[in-house]
Image (cartoon, rainbow, N blue to C red):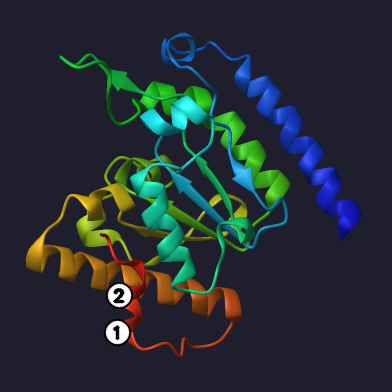
Amino acid sequence: MLEERARRARLLEHGAGVAAACRKCAIGSQRRNNVYGEGDPCARLMVIGEGPGETEDLLGRPFVGRAGQLLDKMLGAIDLAREDVYICNTVKCRPTLPGPRGPKNRAPEPLEMANCRPYLDEQIDIIRPRVILALGAPAAKSFLGRDFQITKMRGRWYEGPQGIALMVTFHPAYLLRQTGGELTAVKRMVWNDLKAIKSKLDEQAPSAPAEQAALFDTQ
């Protein structure tokens, strides 16, 4: 297993270098860093978001801002450390719009996701996870088509690339924008999705009570 992990790590390192040199999209010339991905090359769970944000662009690492901190809590709620999974995005460069205080985040455009898809497909092929967790509608649509509606279609199992089990849930950044009763409701849905993932990974029914949703406190 050590040799296989090292082999996959070398392949991912090579892929990161190729992606870093890519300039197919305008955002490739605008970003600070290419945010390829990080984690266990032999991970059973692969987490895929839509694109890097400001902090990720600055540090060159995926999910390291507030949303990333919440993602760590979400993973911890099903007994997974960040190091146990592989985390990346549909696009490796930060998509932005002009703003009065500097560039602001936006969802990646279809062409940007299409241009970046070979890098993502290669990551999936190298890691061969047992489960893929797509975070947010843009990531889900990259696998399931533009008609995917996250409020109606999340929380189900789909067949992902190479027949890998695919689950969709809300992006942590979406949770951070919710308050009051709406936050409670969304957290409950995400917790149900996480329990389904744990069950799939463990090949047994989850035993944790629903009250453990508090383990990924958004504060």
Residue at 30% across, 40% down: 146
Q: Whole-percent x and y of residue 150?
A: 26, 54
In this view of the protein, which residue sits in the foreground, 17 or 205?
17
Name of the residue lying farthest toward the right: 3
Disc marking residue 78: none
| Quadrant of the drawing holding the C terminus | bottom left
Separation (CA) of disc 1 from disc 2? 6 Å
Instruction: Work out whether residue 52 can be spotted.
Output: no
Label 2 sits on residue = 214
Residue at 40% across, 52% down: 69
Q: Is residue 190 left or right of residue 90?
A: left
| Three-letter amino acid code at the position of disc 2 | Ala
Label 1 sits on residue = 211
Asked where in the image residue 20 lies, by quadrant, the reply is top right
The residue carrying pointer 1 sits among few (fewer than 14), some (14 to 19) or many (20 or more) residues within 10 Å by Cα, namely few
Q: In this view, does 204 lie to the left or right of 135?
A: right
> Is there CB contact under 8 Å for labels 1 and 2?
yes
Secondary structure under the numbered disc 1 in the rendered image:
helix
Q: In this view, does 173 lie above or below 96?
A: below
Q: Is residue 178 left or right of residue 155?
A: left
| Quadrant of the drawing holding the N terminus | bottom right
Q: Whole-percent x and y of residue 204?
A: 55, 87
| Three-letter amino acid code at the position of disc 1 | Glu
Residue at 52% across, 26% down: 116
Secondary structure under the numbered disc 2 in the rendered image:
helix
